[in-house]
Image (cartoon, coloured by chain):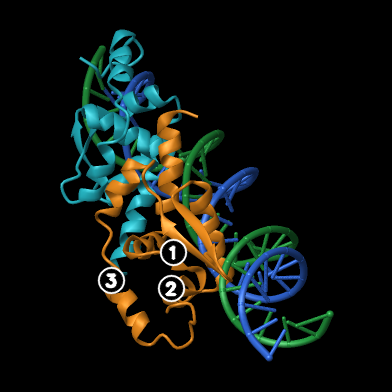
Chain colours: A orange, B cyan, C green, D blue
Amino acid sequence: MDDITKMAETLKLLADRTRLSILALLKERELCVCEIVEILETTQPNISQHLRKLKSAGLVSEARRGQWVYYSLCLDEAPYIQAVMEYVPSSKETLESLKADCVTVECCE
Amino acid sequence: MDDITKMAETLKLLADRTRLSILALLKERELCVCEIVEILETTQPNISQHLRKLKSAGLVSEARRGQWVYYSLCLDEAPYIQAVMEYVPSSKETLESLKADCVTVECCE
DNA sequence: GACTTATATAAGCAACTGATTATATTATCT
DNA sequence: AGATAATATAATCAGTTGCTTATATAAGTC
């Protein structure tokens, strides 16, 4: 697979509303699956499967802590992804409002 | 449509081998459709339809000169696309080798 | 060990995408 | 006007994608 094909494949991962949102969130801080599910208002399997794609491309890494699995951004090997991420609108407010009404999610302590 | 959704939509245009190759070529210089067809070794309708998508997103602009329609890059409005394009491998050699055996294509003068 | 919570995986499906083939349009040349 | 070359559009189709529902695994709690 030549360089351009590989680049197109990697860009496909960003070219999806849900995955780009996940990456935008992880840009702020690491998050566990259930937090992402709550914020993006979708189902858990949906997020899990998107995370798997991002992980197998090496764009995120996971760390289990207790029953929670935390995902964080991992863009050192993907400079052009990093370049794009500079332009993704911040999710800071979204994350703060989550903290505010953090009743349903136990993992945010 | 929120910002992230729009960004994902635009990134979809780059997330395709053929379209990314077209953009990489146009990064070097403007090209007419038949040149792109010859270089990328695909069919004319295929290229035409990809160019239409790129055009309707404003990423390329067209200029008819005689029977040929020349396309050129137009990324002023899309900073993050421009950022990605910095990382796309150059097509300079490909374009020069085209010039070398430019027999079938009449438009390159 | 039984129950609950968090996450992952699998199967199924509707919607979308990229390519091909066929046809239409536009311009040039005689 | 007729023939040719360049490009655009339309129809079709196989392959892919993202989501949902159902189920499995893993960790924590009682």
The residue type indicated by label 3 comes to: Lys
Distance from label 2 to label 1 (Cα)? 8 Å
Judge the density around disc 1: few (<14), some (14-19), many (≥20) Cα neighbours within 10 Å.
some
Tell me whether circle 2 and circle 1 mark residues in contact (CB < 8 Å): yes
Q: Along the horizontal axis of the image, is B26 left or right of A12?
A: left
Q: Residue at x 28, y 71 (%)?
A: A92
Instruction: Answer whether labels 3 and 1 touch (C-beta < 8 Å).
Output: no
- Label 2 is found on which chain of the structure? A
Instruction: Please say whether residue A69 is visible from this viewpoint.
Output: yes
Q: Earlier in the sequence, mark 3 or mark 1?
A: 1
Chain holding disc 1: A
Q: List the residue tagged with mark 3.
A: A92
**Secondary structure type for disc 1:** helix
Q: CA distance from mark 2 to mark 3?
A: 14 Å
Task: Judge from the rendering whether residue B74 lies leftward or rightward of residue A73; answer left or right.
Answer: left
Q: Which residue is under mark 1?
A: A18
Q: Amino acid at mark 1?
A: Thr
Bin the neighbour count of mark 2 within 10 Å (Cα to Cα): few under 14, some 14-19, many 20 and up.
Answer: some
Residue at the spot 30% in from the left edge and 8% down from the top edge = B100
Which residue corresponds to mark 2?
A40
Indicate the position of residue A97 as horizontal and vertical percent values: 32, 82
